[in-house]
Image (cartoon, rainbow, N blue to C red):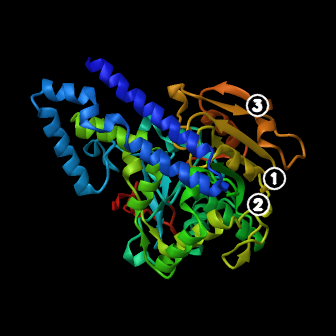
Amino acid sequence: MENSLDQWVMAAYAAGSAGVRRWLADVNADAATRAKLEFAAEQWLAAMHPDNFLATNPEAIRRAVETGGGSLSDGLRLMSADFARGRVSNTDDTAFEVGRNLAITPGAVVMRNRLVELIQYRATTPTVGARPLLIVPPCINKFYILDLQPDNSFVGHCLAAGHTVFMVSWRNPGAAEADLTWDDYLRMGVVDTLAAARAISRSATVNALGFCVGGTILATALAALAARGERPVASLTLLATLLDFSDAGPLGVFVDPATVAYREAALARGGILPGAELAGAFSALRPRDLVWNYVSNGYLKGEKPPAFDLLYWNADSTNLPGPMYCWYLRNMYLENRLREPGGVRSLGEAVDLAAIDVPSYIVATREDHIVPWRSAFASTRLLSGKKRFVLGASGHIAGIVNPPARRRRSFWHAAWPARARAVDADAWLATATETPGSWWSDWSGWLGGHAGRKVTAPEQPGNAKFPPLAVAPGEYVKVRI
């Protein structure tokens, strides 16, 4: 009888969910309104899943009986702790510490300004390419997604391939940084770090890599520098990056003229967008996986979430200065001006992405809900120079952090048509070949061709002008909100 009742509850929920989705399909509305309705409906459906309620979660009831109520007591303690920290926990926070078992690749902070620390990692090979690699990670998260633990560290992979690696570590802004602008992020996060990396390595150019919004910041800065006649990079890698925001995916539901105007009124002259708000928005894109799954397992069953380095990083949120955030929101997500030659002015220059005339390696992931892969592909139409586009399996993070040694997933690649600038994404996919394993290996082969001659690896980070200031991972990355 109990199983029959459970099956009836689940069947009723499934039928109700299907009915809501059919009703939404028949709504006569524009695409933006429909997307918002569908998003709201998915939030409600995820919240109303029978597993989220003790009375309709048979496993939680069974566990409560077996433990004499102990599982419910444990669940209440977990819920109380989450209320205190202001979020639903999806990993064991006590299992990790930045600098102890995360972001432990040896190196030193060799430059610091108001916004960033620049880390230079110690070489792990006797010789390195004369041209270093500068990595610009997203500023809405911590850089150590690319240096989690030794067996899944992208930084470690780059060092093993014989590159001198510099990493931008963004400050977690507080009230003292509430006035920082988009141009401040370009100047202090890219222009200053490019100059330092070039000076330390004594190389006229570097290879530059940007991830997510870090890629947007990097490309904007490079286009502005090109307008001045400065070309400090020899190659550009973009990971899960938007330059054309025509289709921003599910994140688009958070952006409309009224919302942007409200943000500008509140924050454009100064103020902080709390990182917890950003984290909540990203979690809402996958409510069942990132929110309610931990409610049902934690609060109802008393199960402490397992230790998972990626989810620890995901919860280590960062704030954004109001002026920077509002400019980015309006000019990128709302008005999509970056793709237009001269559509935005940055660093005092009219920005034209076509002025970035270097070989580029562009990575997207097939199930990315933050940067849809076809939107990332659109970058190929905006940049000049020879291109290689690679499509990884999985999503925004798991598809990027995919070390070859684990032999997981796959990626698609195809030769870029000679002298072609504009290629259709689906036409490209139709010709692409799927290769088992990680795109990291393919990229390493490509980057090796831009690393320059082999030179003796530096004995220690920095130089006389940029001496080591602190051991990696530095201090900025340790500031939690």
Q: Position of residue 133 (x, y in %)?
A: 61, 52
What is the three-letter code of the residue carrying label 3?
A: Ala
Question: What residue is disc 1 on?
Answer: 385
Whether tag 2 and tag 1 are in contact, CB under 8 A, the answer is: yes
What is the three-letter code of the residue carrying label 2?
A: Ile
Q: Is residue 127 above or below residue 130?
A: above
Q: Is residue 281 above or below residue 419?
A: below
Label 3 – label 2 distance at C-alpha: 25 Å
Q: Position of residue 197 (x, y in %)?
A: 58, 61
| Label number found at residue 356 | 2
Question: What residue is disc 3 on?
Answer: 432
What is the three-letter code of the residue carrying label 1?
A: Gly
At x 57%, y 46%, the residue is 24
Label 1 – label 3 distance at C-alpha: 20 Å
Asked whether residue 144 appears in the rendered view, the answer is yes
Is disc 3 placed on a helix, strand or loop?
loop
Q: Position of residue 317 (x, y in %)?
A: 40, 57
